[in-house]
Amino acid sequence: MGRLLFDISGLCQWYGFLDHPSGIQRVVERILCSAPLCTYPSVELIARAPGAQDFYGVDLAVVTALAQPTTRRKAIARLRRQFAEGMRLARLGGLGRDFRWMHVPYWALGWSGLSFLLEGRYRRGDPSPTRRVAPLTDQDVIVGLGDFWCHEGHATALAALATRSRARLVHMVHDLFGLDHPGWTHPYFGRLFARSLAQLAPHVDLWLANSRFVAGSLASYLERGGMVGGPIDVVPMGWDHFDTTPAPHDAEILRRHGLRHGAYLLHVGTVEPRKGIEILLRAARRVATKNGRWPIPCLLIGREGWRSQTVRAELRTVGQDSVRWLRDVPDMHLPAIYRGARFSVVPSLGEGWGFAVQESLAQGTPCIASRVGAIPEVGGDLVTYAEPGDIDGLAMLIERWSSDDQLVAGMRAEIAEKLRRQRPLPSWDAAGAQILKSAASGCTGSPIRPREG
């Protein structure tokens, strides 16, 4: 195997406009920061700007800096500058296909040469941070970690790059909800996901999936479409090095967000239909109607997503003493907020993995979750399950967990003990090692089949 080139176009696009990652961005960052990939001598990062056919190089150190609180803001600024500089590679025809109104400032800054404004420590006249990627060969492997639909023409450009160079193409899929449940995502992105996957699939030598559930769904989709290609490897999703014991700074973080330890129910995730937040609020309201008071304050943490107006309307009918929604919470604050929660609820209608479940357990916080998708792979016997959409069943659990101190304390002790016995838990280093192994040995063109790494 020659070079291992990771396509991070979606990551650059995301941080062009947003500061806080969603699930896919977190996976990409943690995999790229894993020791096996950081120490592998031939890893390169590449990205493509809207309207471009060519890819530019991105320094791996910029992405690894995202993981450090002290360097994160500078790393995001650097990615934004490179995103603007990459606009210089765009072709007129490509811009007509990929361009959207939100790209205008980056196009203007890139072509005016003023992209240094996106990164304060650069001065006009400094060399551009954007560099072309050296020509690929048939010994190289291109790896995409999940967001192949970041632009309209991205899948086409990626397939053309692999075909032109005869490099092998490896791509990860996190879920197929855009195909199976179009109402769960914005219509634009749902249609774009479907087109991009169909365009990319014939060129992929090896698929990666984040769970056995997704691997099975992907295999079914490809077989229904009559597509023959590489196998599907399951990449272990790492457990961050969280701790179930309170840290010294926990109290300060909770105070900063106006929270009291053990006095709130927690939901973490983008506010969109798939997450089932309306189900959670209706279940809590049902308990409040029965008992004449809200069972326990609900804390929602997550950015505003597709069709979030229904949740906003629901929140207008209750006071902040009952439900709070924090849209932008730094990742570094999440462990303390998980540890401070009485319990968490993940009432999702579908999950390709279920990081909110995993993170809750990693902090020793009991979790109620839907028995759906890959959540049972994450939660095992450490989670109390409710059927997706079952408002009555969820209401009963919330009512009991809000009042039974002994029950919650017992579950906390059980989680801590079982996780201690299961150690070592899967790590992001294991995920990086699996990708290296798959890329080196799995691009064989053999029949589609899920196979666990």
Image (cartoon, helix red, strand yellow):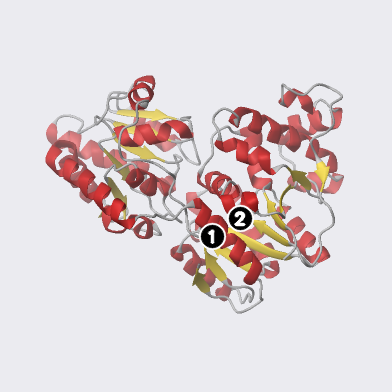
Q: Where is residue 280? Give x, y as percent.
A: 30, 42
Q: Where is residue 268? Give x, y as percent.
A: 40, 39
What residue lies at 68% left-to-right and 70% top-to-bottom?
A: 202
Query: Is residue 50 something one can see in this rendering?
Result: no
Q: Where is residue 391? Give x, y as percent.
A: 25, 48
Mark 2: secondary structure: helix
> Which quarter of the rendering shows the N terminus?
bottom right
Find out whether the residues at labels 2 and 1 contact each other: C-beta distance under 8 Å.
yes
What residue lies at 63% left-to-right and 71% top-to-bottom?
A: 441
Mark 1: secondary structure: helix
- Relative side of 386 to 326, left or right: left
The residue that mark 1 highlights is 179
Earlier-in-chain disc, 2 versus 1: 1
Q: Residues within 10 Å of mark 1 (few under 14, many from 20)?
A: some
* Pick the front one: 69 or 224: 69
What residue lies at 65% left-to-right and 46% top-to-bottom?
A: 10
Q: How many marks?
A: 2
260 vs 413: above or below: above
Q: Where is residue 323? Give x, y as percent.
A: 31, 29
What residue lies at 37% left-to-right and 60% top-to-bottom?
A: 377
Q: Which quadrant holds residue 324?
A: top left
The three-letter code of the residue at mark 1 reads Leu
- Relative side of 201 to 241, left or right: right
The residue that mark 2 highlights is 193
The three-letter code of the residue at mark 2 reads Phe
